[in-house]
Amino acid sequence: MAETTEASKPSLPEAEKKKEQSLPFYQLFSFADKYDWLLMISGSIGAIIHGSSMPVFFLLFGEMVNGFGKNQSDLYKMTHEVSKYALYFVYLGIVVCLSSYAEIACWMYTGERQVSTLRKKYLEAVLKQDVGFFDTDARTGDIVFSVSTDTLLVQDAISEKVGNFIHYLSTFLAGLVVGFVSAWRLALLSVAVIPGIAFAGGLYAYTLTGLTSKSRESYAQAGIIAEQAIAQVRTVYSFVGESKALSSYTDAIQNTLKIGYKAGMAKGLGLGCTYGIACMSWALVFWYAGVFIRNGQTDGGKAFTAIFSAIVGGMSLGQSFSNLGAFSKGKAAGYKLMEIIKQRPSIVQDATDGKCVAEVKGDIEFKSVTFSYPSRPDVIIFRDFSIFFPAGKTVAVVGGSGSGKSTVVSLIERFYDPSQGQVLLDNMDIKTLQLRWLRDQIGLVNQEPALFATTILENIRYGKPDATMEEVEAATSAANAHSFISLLPNGYNTQVGERGVQLSGGQKQRIAIARAMLKDPKILLLDEATSALDASSESIVQEALDRLMIGRTTVVVAHRLSTIRNVDSIAVIQQGQVVETGTHEELIAKAGAYASLIRFQEMVRNRDFANPSTRRSRSSRLSHSLSTKSLSLRSGSLRNLSYSYSTGADGRIEMISNAETDRKNPAPDGYFCRLLKLNAPEWPYSIMGAIGSVLSGFIGPTFAIVMSNMIEVFYYRNPASMERKTKEYVFIYIGAGLYAVVAYLIQHYFFSIMGENLTTRVRRMMLAAILRNEVGWFDEEEHNSSLVAARLATDAADVKSAIAERISVILQNMTSLLTSFIVAFIVEWRVSLLILATFPLLVLANFAQ
């Protein structure tokens, strides 16, 4: 039985609370299969080995330092010790190469696989929802945003970032193990300071989670405005509403801009405090290391190994926290996706326990039906409504606007279920039938036919995907569509544009009829199928409909009463009740509600005919519909035609060919500079951010200088000198911790101002440029509203990453690199030259990555 469940609507506070929630991290892997688990296990093993390699390196390096320090008087023994450990370093390098490859490749591949499944499951879940879901809970902009943006956030959270997190966490744990083995007192002290570092990282992740969720929800509102403006671009153009749409969009993204500022500050403070607390922790460890060495409780090599393992472990813990931001974003995005995937529709489409009848007679009966739409539960459409549609007969349903005519069609299709009463097919409640089987028995032709942005052939085959070309041509011939399709340059392979805008109303309707004919349904529903057509198109379409209705139970929802005079029966609905039934002649003789409708329409028609402007309009529409040239006229691109064919279609094809040629051309050089110019108003902020990046770049070389000097201090033979120097370097570390907080805050906060303003400006300019295009541009397959809106959401955000974030990282790394080399050449230029010789290999490896 096709199931029905009662879905209770959450209150507003509950809905707001729901938005702030995020998914448990493990549930992001819900769609992993056995192969994905194998990849994740392999990647995790690689990450653990890769992460553990650094503490092992320090263990070997500490032993080598002892070989230098303890064998200064025996050159042969010192050389032997150094050579032995140098070979160990070679073996370690090979292990690192293989394990890092396994870590990155496995996690990236499984991330792609799982998110591909997630996208499919999400779209399947959306398409399985009942129509009421789209009336009340979902908007097209939300769905497009989730598919294009939320899934990318989930992918970022479950792929390479997980490998990085395991890698850095392994470095931290391995550092503790090596530290305990080398000097347990120092290692124990390192453990004692970990909670402070963890607290700083956790607070940063928590804050960023909330800001990320708010930012996503904020832009979703702006995205809806943009998507609606693009989807309804003809209406926007006709009312000169481009400026209004752009203004509304600009206002909506201002809130996203402010949230971005807060996120930048949170990132700077979070990373700065994490590194600051780590620096102060290292200062404490160095202080006690000097005490232990002076007391003879350890030696310089073991102290070096314990301290460096603790330092790298602490830094790795901080680096692992940098991935928490991606995890938080992924959990917030995943919650919204999984809520839709898990949501059980009130009308289950894929239930397999319902009945499938071998032979359908076609009797349809509404029995004491009470119904109201989910979006308007307080407005009763039907109350105790009953009507019968006999098998093989054509019954027209007429009435005023809002009387419930189209609702009859929706209930037969089981788009909705009545709150009371039954809809019966051959004396069986349609709730007891398999929904897919039920809809296979029904053909629907609406007032505005729904065509997809693909070819005519694919639109027709939507009614029967496995139909042969002969069957398609037979259906189009019966629908009076084959002749005009054959005149098109690409015939059945002609693209119809988004929602079929390349075709006239009559042409679209005939394709919809052909699609219904191909399905060969037992029941036919015609929902005002000719009411939007001009007289000429109406006669052609009506002829096709007359063929389609033969031998089928047909329900006609009629607006023009002249089209239903020959039907078997007419039912007049007023205020959700059937007030009259009978043939056209019987109802005219009654002089009741039906006769009043007839008189009203004749009065309107006579008034329009007496108006000369109306007659001219009709004449224009008639000549327009008779010409297949409408295909090119409706593309909105006549001014771009370089030559014309007798139907006008070749011109459009030539235009598309030119556009395709333009798209194949590479983008001109200089776009990076143009983006920098767009950021010109924020250059004062970018200068401050650049200063912060440079200051952050000094942190690494400062650590290297202090650490190398500390190693030398550990081999001082004078305890007093060792104590004095240790104090100096401890205070330097404390100062470096405070320095890191300020440097990271300046860097990330000011670059976030630069990046967020650039993203906002680019989005506004993109929408303005989109709305400057001619209507024909939107008809092309790659320019449909969903794709353009998705690019508006994601491409502008990528610009921020390419400019502000990249400049920030490049300045920091370049400062660190140059400072390191300057210090290295000052200390020992020969060793520095040797290291510099390997630098091209490192650059090449990073470039390949």
Image: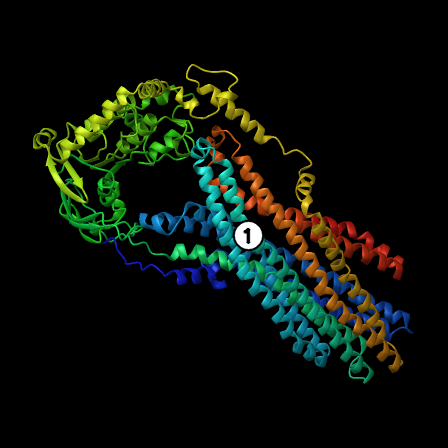
For disc 1, the neighbor class at 10 Å (few under 14, some 14 to 19, many from 20) is: many
**Residue 364 at x, y percent in the picture:** 16, 42
Q: Above or below — where is 558 with respect to 486?
A: below
Q: Quadrant of residue 591?
A: top left
Secondary structure beneath label 1: helix
**Residue 101 at x, y percent in the picture:** 63, 55
Q: Is residue 543 visible?
A: yes
Q: Nearer the viewer, residue 34 or 775?
A: 775
- Give the residue displayed 15% in from the left and 37% down from the top: 571
**Residue 486 at x, y percent in the picture:** 36, 20
Q: Is residue 37 visible?
A: no
Q: Above or below — where is 761 with respect to 75?
A: above
Q: Is residue 238 left or right of residue 618?
A: right
Q: How is the image coloured?
A: rainbow
Q: Nearer the viewer, residue 567 or 150?
A: 567
Q: Above or below — where is 667 with respect to 4?
A: above
Q: Nearer the viewer, residue 268 or 643?
A: 268
**Residue 510 at x, y percent in the picture:** 30, 27
Q: Is residue 509 left or right of residue 654?
A: left
Q: Is residue 559 left or right of residue 184?
A: left
Q: Is residue 173 left or right of residue 526?
A: right
Q: Residue furthest top?
A: 646
Q: Nearer the viewer, residue 613 or 388?
A: 613
The total number of labels drawn is 1
- Give the residue displayed 28% in from the left and 58% down from the top: 6
Q: Quadrant of the N terminus?
A: bottom left
Q: Which residue is disc 1 drawn over?
A: 256
Name the amino acid, label 1.
Thr
Q: Quadrant of residue 692?
A: bottom right
Q: Residue furthest bottom?
A: 295
